[in-house]
Image (tube, rainbow, N blue to C red):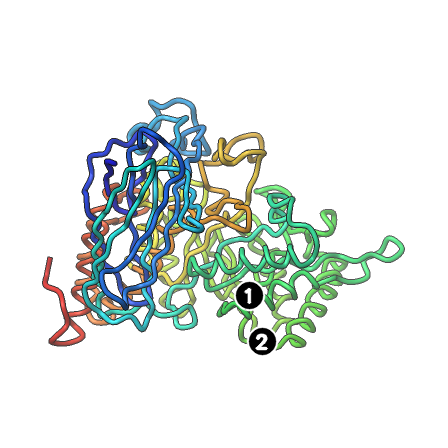
Amino acid sequence: MDYSVFDDCTWLFPDTPLSGARAARLDAPRGGHAGFQLLAAPPAEGGPVHVSFAWSSPGGPAVQIYELLPVVVNENTAPTLMTTTDYALCRDYVTRKAPFEVYDALSPCCGGICAGRAFYLSAEISAQQAPGLYTGVFRLACGGEELACPVSCRVYDVCVPDLGSARLGMLNFFCYENIAAQHPGAEGRQAQRRLLRAYIRAQLEMRCTHILLPPGRPVYQNGRLAGFDFSAAEQAGRIALEAGAPWLCGGHIAHWAEWTGAEYYPFWDESTGVTTLEGYFQLRLYFSSWARVIRQNGWQGRIAQALADEPQVHNTAAYRILAAVCRKFLPGVPILDAVEAAELGGGLDIWVPKLDTYEKHREIFDRLKGAGETMWFYTCAFPAGRAMNRSMDLPLTVSRAVLWMAALYRLSGYLHWGFNYYIGQDIWHSACCPHKGALLPAGDAHIVYPGAHGPLRSMRFEAQRGGAEDCELLFQLMDGSQEEAEDLIRPVCISSCSYTPEGEVLLRARRQLMVDLERRAGPGAPGERQ
């Protein structure tokens, strides 16, 4: 049975030729992971594929084996906004012309039996793993044919901190309603709770430090607002903290009616502005009730609050009023939001400008950062084109390198809106989800897929997880030498639109990062300069 090995920063397609390596080389830090992809030629007789892995000697890292599932990218990312069917407009930055299939979804090989020919193997390195070189064999058997792929894994004496000690914060928006919609077979409270736990656990495995909670549900009596039901938020918060989440984040409560409008409106009352007297009484009722829930659950010091997504120059005054009401009833709770403006001083504790917005106004945002403000960044469907995003027709390196930008720009967190916003009827054959009469770039709305028992990871999920691990190590290197760290980063990326599409370039820099950190730790550490 013929096969080829590919790194985990390069897309595979059903028509990818078998021209890669015949052995897998992994390099990993303690507390992190390293993976590779394998594509096998289909055997003549067909049938189920039996997979297994074993280290040559006891004591090797834990290993997870997944089958790669193809997903259809139905349109390409447009140069400035959303998607396009004109390949001539985007051929300079996309991987191939849509529509096409790409291996993105990961299905665990339960019981060692799979149906496909594409696989992903990940070595999961514990913080206690002994540094050194481990060797093993990944075996596949099908229709009387077998293959044995040699695997080596160098574990370096450097360590990615656990989430409780992470220096890179991360928040991915979480659509609770979509869980039930995409898992119709999970009926009853126990089944829904199991699913919720699985989705929250997946966010933590991707190194999200903050879990977004659902906002309170308005309760009416005789047609009048009487209070709010926070039971869904309480359930999600308790599950998240039990699962090890360092932080919770209260859900958004307001939005603008028009992008250029000056007012914000509560989600439960789209006709009452937050700056009006009636708006204040409604916000007072919301925040005072939410404050009681936080106190009763002992969440003080472990919860942030999102207020209104993407405040911009037209509504900064309304946002600051909204923030003032929040601070009155939630003292000490940091406010965290994606922002499109810098004129929000005093209204925010954790600023999250879009990556290109930060670059355009870097002098202003760096001045805020220099004054002691906490500065994250985010990416989404806008701007489209070459800009770093998790789109499935951009190079897979982008989903990982975007978090190297956090180290380059000294930004302390990352946000993305699309964890599980499964919009549309069939995301397996239409990765470009509908939005306001157009289509979002492929995969922008989701980085997991609905599986039979919970969310399935994606290659973009693994890339983002890897990027977060890399960023933690880059921060460690910067503690000793910012110049040395920047020299490693620049071959990988220097801006939101300038980055390498080559997975090997990123992985070579990552390997050198671990070598440099290990050398700094003192003599006797294994590894030589590459």
Up/down of 174 relative to 117, above or below? below
Query: Residue 52, how many percent across, how many down?
Result: 33, 51
Instruction: State left or right for residue 504 relative to residue 298.
Output: left
Q: Which badge, 1 or 2, comes first in the chain's sequence?
A: 1
| Closest to the observer, 442 or 490 | 442
Query: Residue 83, how many percent across, how many down?
Result: 45, 30
Q: Nearer the viewer, mark 1 or mark 2?
A: 1
Up/down of 232 relative to 434, above or below? below
Quick one: quadrant of the C terminus? bottom left
Residue at the disc numbered 2: 300
Mark 2: amino acid: Gln
Instruction: State left or right for residue 79 relative to residue 279.
Output: left
Quadrant in the rendering for residue 195: bottom right
Mark 1: amino acid: Ala
Which residue is found at the position 68% from the left and 71% from the top? 293
Residue at the disc numbered 1: 240
Q: Residues within 10 Å of mark 1 (few under 14, many from 20)?
A: many
Which residue is found at the position 45% from the left and 45% from the top? 380
Q: Residues within 10 Å of mark 2 (few under 14, many from 20)?
A: some
Label 1, label 2: how far apart the Cα atoms are: 15 Å
Up/down of 23 relative to 306, above or below? above
Q: Determine if residue 113 is in view.
A: yes
**Under tag 2, what secondary structure?**
loop
Quick one: quadrant of the N terminus? top left
